[in-house]
Image: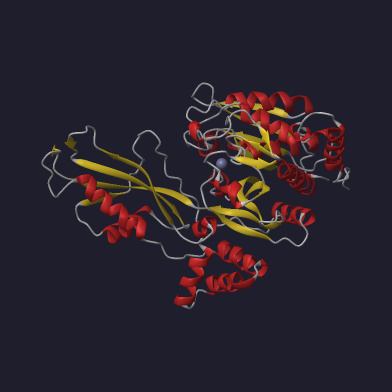
Amino acid sequence: MRPVNPFQLFSRYAAASVVAGLCVCADAQAQSPSPTAELLKELIQVDTSNPPGNEARIDDLLAAKLRPLGFKIDIIPTPVPGKSVLFARLQGDGSARPVLITSHGDVVGVERDKWTVDPFAGLTKDGYIYGRGAIDFKGGMAVFAQAVMELARNKVPLKRDVIFLVEADEESATYNTSWLAQSHWDKMDCEFALNEGGWIMTKPNGEVRYVSVSTNDKSSIAILLTARGTSTHSSMPLPDNAIFSLARALTKLGDYDTKVELTPSTRQFFSTLGQTADGPMKQYFSDLVDGQDPVKLAAADKAISADPLLHAIMRTTIAPVIINGGFRGNVIPGSAEANVNFRTIPGTTAEDLVAMVKKIVNDPRIEVTAPRSNPARPGTIPNSVAGTQDSTTDTALYRALAASANKLWPGVPVTPYLFQAGTDAIAWRSRGVPVYGIYPYPISNDDLRRMHGNDERVPIQSLDQGTKLIYDTLVAVAGK
Ligand SMILES: [Zn+2]
């Protein structure tokens, strides 16, 4: 039996809204009534830009809130001072194996001069919380933390432990979950896990269009292009200028679009979009999934690729991210190098990419390599290779998440999804533990583009909906 009316959580928010509405403050909206939004503000205000991360400050902040509610707290230090991992375990009766929900404590850095607000103030504006991590992933951390705290406050009888994990180094990978699993797998082991991943996307009118739950991630593989030429005085240029050669190679890569490759989950995802689409898009989605007619497929690819997220998940993507070359204004350098980041469809290897790039560039003077470990230069990231096998959707956790989403947004499709980037899910997926990903808040394409970019933000209303989604999911999957 469910001891808690699932709407109790929301009625509390609603009551707070009424109080805020009666308030004679100049800006009632600024007095956010949402406990999840209030928690998110606190989390954003702790700058955990990685490097260096300093995630221990987030762990301390959350431990102080969780411990009094009965969570068993374990903070695991990493070899780097100031960087740790938090486990908070809410105990069940042990009749079922644990469910784990995880979030990363670090965020990527900011180009501060390009933000219109302080990225670490946790500002409320026009119904949004602004700040680095608002979407990735302090927003999710706030939702997950709020949901598990509500479980504890409401004393929901549990048949399984609920483990809330705050990871370190997700954005830079040194002391991430793969590192953690080597020494502390016993603490992470579970029947299934929930992580960041799929999207709850809205239509232009704000209604939820679909809920996608990631069952696998794309891999991230770096390829280096190195052009060599004669190093000489810039007053007497030679035809073998390394920077020109590199530029020509990158132009060819830029003009190339990789072929469409649908996995079982993206096939299901695009079929679902087809069911909910109107007008010509319905046919385009159908032609994409069908994939038999090259002309129709090309037209479908072009139309669907107007959405950069959809463009990304149907193919391996190519993005030059760092260029190195030259050191003085009057010297032609002897070499120039581009670090190109590929986000690959599961099963694609670095060797496949090297062969593809060599063919596209078609210039023997350009060396194309897949460094075993990415060169330790500022800003480079290690490769992250996801598994080739999707997590099964035939679990109580996936079903609970889909049912909770259906209750919140009736008639909105829920579909498995190939996450367009990488996450820390590999630690579980590689050990055969099903792990699902969701950014638990409805967002628009505009919101999505700000992730890892400038003026990152999340709607407060979406945080509240997400808290309800996750709370209901946990009650269904872990409640007696
Ligand atoms: Zn993230």
Nearest the viewer among 383 and 228 is 228
Q: Say if residue 434 shows up in the picture.
A: no
Determine whether 232 is above or below 269 in the image.
above
Percent across and percent down for residue 338 are 31, 45
Percent across and percent down for residue 313 are 52, 58
**Residue at horizontal 35%, vertical 34%?**
377
**Which quadrant holds residue 18?**
top right
> Farthest residue toward the left?
236
* Coloration mode: secondary structure
Nearest the viewer among 317 and 331 is 331
> Farthest residue toward the top?
81
Side of 323 where 441 appears, left or right:
right
Percent across and percent down for residue 59 are 63, 27
Side of 130 where 359 appears, left or right:
left
**Residue at horizontal 42%, vertical 41%?**
382
Q: Say if residue 425 shows up in the picture.
A: yes
Percent across and percent down for residue 431 are 56, 47
> Which quadrant holds the C terminus?
top right
Q: Find ligand 1 in the image and state its quadrant.
A: top right
Side of 468 where 338 appears, left or right:
left
Determine whether 173 is above or below 316 in the image.
above
Determine whether 30 is above or below 348 in the image.
above
Side of 80 where 274 appears, left or right:
right
**Which quadrant holds residue 337?**
top left
**Residue at horizontal 54%, vertical 33%?**
183
> Farthest residue toward the bottom?
293
